[in-house]
Amino acid sequence: MKMRLKIIADGAKNMYNLCLGFTKTMKRKEILVLEDLLGSNKKIASEIRDKLTHKGILTINFMSSPGSGKTALLERIAEHLKPKYKMAVIEGDIETERDAERIRAKGILAWQIITGGACHLEAKMIGKLFPEIPPDLDFLFIENVGNLVCPASYDLGENIRCVLLSVPEGDDKPKKYPKAFTTSDCLILTKSDLLSLMPFDSERAQKEALEINPKLNIFVTSSLKDNGVKELIAFFIATRQKLLSQNA
Ligand SMILES: Nc1nc2c(ncn2[C@@H]2O[C@H](COP(=O)(O)OP(=O)(O)OP(=O)(O)O)[C@@H](O)[C@H]2O)c(=O)[nH]1
Ligand SMILES: [Mg+2]
């Protein structure tokens, strides 16, 4: 009886080791494939950034959870920038052309990338649109797929990366989803018109975001009320000015 139990125990241990070995090999392969993918993404992104920067186009990547107000903010930005500057928008969504249609309705050139399931945009997707991007643009905005995790790992060739966090999402998100915040240049706290209605501690969100990324430029906006949008745009204009003076 004892012997039988030992055989079963050894068998289970062997099976466990077999599974573990298999898993380890699989994980190593998965890691290698991911490193390859991110490596080639980085290379394409860097080429895109060089080409756009050389043309004097400032590229801005908006990342956030679904529904944080990326498109609404772009609609507002379009209204402010249109009289003086030339901008275009690349929209990323899993399905539908809806966001690009909203931007076009503002009289702005917009392309829709439909990822068909992928939770983020990749540099090669932007690269495919490259021949269509007018060389005389001042600003190119990219609205990433609504997701606070995956887009953070993919450089799209942007000059400025912005993470949006809306009041209804909660003030604890920067430390729970750190990569989107640590890899960004700007934090935009959106839907500030809801601050009086919700238990969102704006100071806590800003403090915790700065603890993990002290270089963040922070803006508080309401697209609904058109608050804080001008300050954000002034930052984009000043950054483009710097880019132009570096090009000169
Ligand atoms: N109260 C308030 N609501 C807003 C504001 N901005 C956007 N919304 C609302 O939030 C919802 C989502 O806005 P979108 O601009 O579509 O959000 P999004 O981040 O582009 O969403 P996805 O593209 O699906 O990820 C809509 O119902 C908007 O009307 C704001 O400043 N204040
Ligand atoms: Mg949108």
Image (cartoon, rainbow, N blue to C red):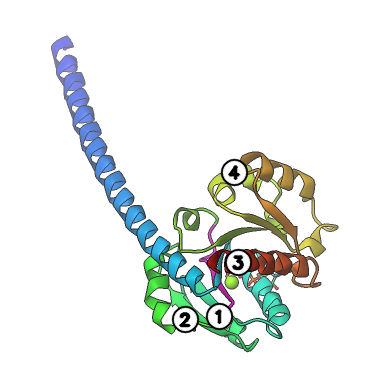
Judging by the rendered image, the residue that carries numbered circle 4 is: 176
Q: Which is in the foreground here, disc 1 or disc 4?
A: 1
The quarter of the picture showing ligand 2: bottom right
Q: Which is in the foreground here, disc 2 or disc 4?
A: 2
Report whether 225 appears left or right of 109: right
Label 3 Cα neighbours within 10 Å, binned few <14 / some 14-19 / many ≥20? few
> In the image, what residue occupies the spot 27% across and 46% down?
32
Residue 217 vs 237, above or below: the answer is above
Q: Which is in the foreground here, disc 3 or disc 1?
A: 3
> What residue type is disc 1 on?
Leu
Label 2 Cα neighbours within 10 Å, binned few <14 / some 14-19 / many ≥20? some
Is the CB–ligand 2 distance for label 1 below 8 Å?
no
Position of residue 165 measured from the top left corner of the image (x, y, whole percent): 66, 57
Q: Which is in the foreground here, disc 3 or disc 2?
A: 3
Position of residue 20 measured from the top left corner of the image (x, y, whole percent): 25, 32
Q: Would you say the residues marked 1 and 2 are in contact, meaning their CB atoms lie under 8 Å apart?
A: yes
- Helix, strand or loop at label 4? It is helix
Q: Which stretch is magenta?
A: 137-147
> What residue type is disc 3 on?
Ser
Tag shown at residue 124 = none
Quadrant placement of the C terminus: bottom right
* Mark-to-mark CA distance, 2 and 4: 36 Å
